[in-house]
Amino acid sequence: MSVDLDPEAFWPRQDYSRVPYRVYHDRGIYDRELDRVFRGRAWSFLGLDAEIPNPGDFRTCFVGDTPVVYNRDTDGAVYAFVNRCAHRGALVRREVAGNAETHTCIYHQWCYGRDGGLKSIPFRRGIKGKGGLDPSFDLGAHGLKRLKVDAVAGALFGTFAEDAEPLRDYLGPPVVAQIERLFQRPVRVLGYHRQRINGNWKMFAENTRDNYHASLLHEFLVTFGIDRATQTGGVTMDARHRHNITWAEAASDSPEFARDMYRQANIRNDYLRLRDPRLVEFRREHPDNMNLAVTTVFPNAVFVQINNSLATRQIRPKGVGCFEVFQTLVGYADDDAEMVAHRLRSANLVGPAGYVSMEDGCVGGFVQRGTCRCAASGRTTPS
Ligand SMILES: [Fe+2]
């Protein structure tokens, strides 16, 4: 499908009150998002310092649809580079994680250092004077494309733009404060989820900003008072409205009032029962009383606290109608065994089959399926 670049054709109002469904379906728009956002000046979330604590530790991830490796060098510095051999474009690292002195492509054994620089090439001078590369070939000019890397409280971000604004300026003070709150103490990884959803990547980024749906779609949240409209809570954004923090305070409404309000709105709120109430137990661990804090950072990151379940999510576009959510569950390094068990119990709410997150995965697909026919007609969301 060709891209109609006339903005009037896409946005009938000069604000965000009518979103054209086409933005979820148009391949041309999708390609421009990858180029201008993910390979542009935005900072994308890569992973956590805690995942690569030792020199040589590496992990693979995605920035947009670009495969990326991030790893730690001997001096502690973190480097990130495109996971694509400079020779024939093969993945250099096919593993999810590991520890290595160098990174060698399996195809022709081109070997790269931890900074992504090209170190050696087999048969560079040929054999017995025959073959080999031109003597003018410059190893230094054929390294893996590097990303600029910076971190806030152990959360690693990367950008392709050398002239990108400083990370803390990009995030803004409210988001920096939330990341520092989540990672108030050293963390350790408890596990990973990976989920593929048949929707456009922006659906997920929007859904985590959409406070309205929380206690309407998620019966679990409304029934057990984890996030409902009758609680003290709200939304905080950075000055430029790129990022979003949705938050709620524990036990800040009465169950009776909440039940009454939701009953009046004809919303089922007392249907679910738990055999093990520990599943929804909230143990306060911060000076504030927030039991829910979901921070969505443009373009690809979500930092999540739901009760005592803590996680990061990386959104990975996989085509205009498909994306992956890669979730890393964490606890604090000084958690005792009982607290780890409690966090993992709480984690039943999140992930592909989570009592709450399963529904978020579904609605991305529902919108994609519901809008594909009207995308071409210029229809928009209702005001
Ligand atoms: Fe949700």
Image: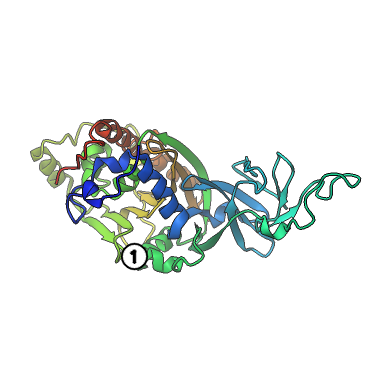
Q: Is residue 208 above or below residue 289?
A: above
Disc 1 C-beta below 8 A from ligand 1 = no
Q: Relative to 154, say whether 32 is above or below.
A: above
- Under circle 1, the secondary element is helix
Q: Is any atom of residue 309 visible in this view?
A: no
Q: How is the image coloured?
A: rainbow
Taking the spot 45% from the left edge, 57% from the top edge, the residue there is 40
Where is residue 157? Give x, y as percent. Answer: 49, 58
For this orientation, the residue located farthest to the right is: 128
In this view of the protein, which residue sits in the foreground, 309 or 2?
A: 2
Amino acid type for the residue under numbered disc 1 = Pro
Question: x, y percentage for residue 82?
Answer: 58, 51
Instruction: Out of 4 and 182, give the one closest to the viewer.
Output: 4
Q: Residues within 10 Å of mark 1 (few under 14, many from 20)?
A: some
Query: Residue 200: x and y, percent?
Result: 35, 40
Residue displayed at 48% across by 51% down: 331
> Residue 177 appears in which quarter of the rendering?
bottom left
Is residue 136 left or right of 84 when viewed as pictured? right
* Camera-side residue of 111 and 7: 7
Q: Position of residue 173 (x, y in %)?
A: 36, 68
Q: Which residue is mark 1?
A: 174
Residue shown at 19%/36% (left/top)? 269
Residue 188 located left or right of residue 219: right
Which quadrant of the rendered structure holds the N terminus?
A: top left
Residue 163 to residue 258: above or below: below
